[in-house]
Amino acid sequence: MGVDLGDLIITRKKISLEDLSGKAIAIDAYNAIYQFLSIIRGVAGEPLKDREGRITSHLSGLFYRTVNLLENGIKPVYVFDGKPPSLKEAEIKRRMKIKEEAVIKYEEALRKGDLEEAKRYAQMTSKIGDSMIEDAKRLLDALGVPWVQAPSEGEAQASCMAIRGDVWGVASQDYDSLLFGSPRLIRNLTLSERRKLPKKNVYVEVELELIELDKVLKELEITREQLIDIGILTGTDFNPNGIKGIGPKKALKIIKENERLEFAAKKLNVEKVEELIKIREIFLNPEVSLDYRLEWKTPNINDVIGFLCHERDFSETRVKNALERIMLGIKEAKAKKTLEAFFE
């Protein structure tokens, strides 16, 4: 779910993959893998599987999207979630209930022979298992792409890395990284260039967006702490329902009039204010690790082919072609760096 700040973001800079060339980008791994599991499916909504019935949709998305990034000279680092804060328990249960209900509706749609409806509900049933995470990390190792295991929230860890300057920005579909303090949020980086509108046979272009925290705060005339308070009033993963009847724009007005969450909560007769303050603390002082190392290496072609093609039944021709694109991208990036150094 994440916090809903979309209506408040005034400036969204349209960028291209070329604009990110040479930059290290921290990617919310769970966010991306959920996208791949949801989108990469068959006609009736079934996920891709190998001959032994193991799901491979996430590997397909992770591999080909990462190839695209590396080919364009981008240096991705994937950040994986750790143990969620206890306050997230309600949101986790809510998501599980939605998935359980979607499974029932998916099966009903299949019985009716409505494949379009079946696929729509199938996308809502995606679950990330431990084996999927292990497979994803194994693939990234083979590709020479670093990954970081967060002790808790992945977006908090990624934002910490951006604040420290170890990465240029954070890539995610959620806006939470802005609350965690990332100076830059890149949206749509792990999505395909086109997507189908729900319930319509219409496709729209998906553009990369850059949102900069300092510009958001300046345009809204608030502090980062006030942005967090707005998120809490609207609803976060730690209080999914927020305060009843309050959306982003109303929350902005309330915080501007009352300055702080505590004062606003008193006027709104909100109970359990202490719990809301704890949520603010999660965003201001999240549990993160500083013990990580970012190193991009040349892909181990044999390992990639052995894993994807020999173990998971990927097309060897397609995988080899993709790897050639990576190697060409690395070669061009080195040549560009050498040329730039020559003219310095």
Image (tube, grey):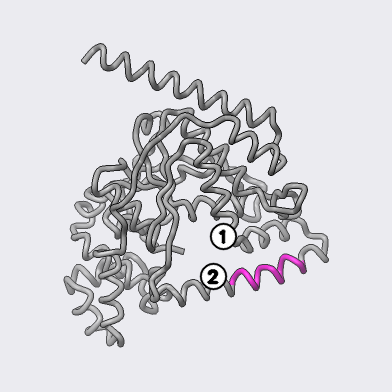
Measuring 59% from the left and 75% from the top, which residue is drawn there? 97
Residue at the disc numbered 1:
130
Measuring 42% from the left and 39% from the top, which residue is drawn there? 76
Identity of the amino acid at label 2? Arg
Q: How far apart are marks 2 and 1 (CA)?
A: 18 Å
Identity of the amino acid at label 1? Asp
Q: Quadrant of the C terminus?
A: top left
The answer to whether residue 302 is visible is yes
* Residue 54 in picture, x, y percent from top left: 70, 53
Would residue 126 appear left or right of 288 to someone viewing this image? Answer: right
- The question of residue 72 being in magenta is answered with no
* Residue 319 in picture, x, y percent from top left: 63, 31
Measuring 60% from the left and 49% from the top, which residue is drawn there? 58
The answer to which of marks 2 and 1 sits earlier in the sequence is 2
Residue at the disc numbered 2:
95
Eyeballing the image, is 337 above or below 47? above
Give the extent of the magenta segment: 98-108
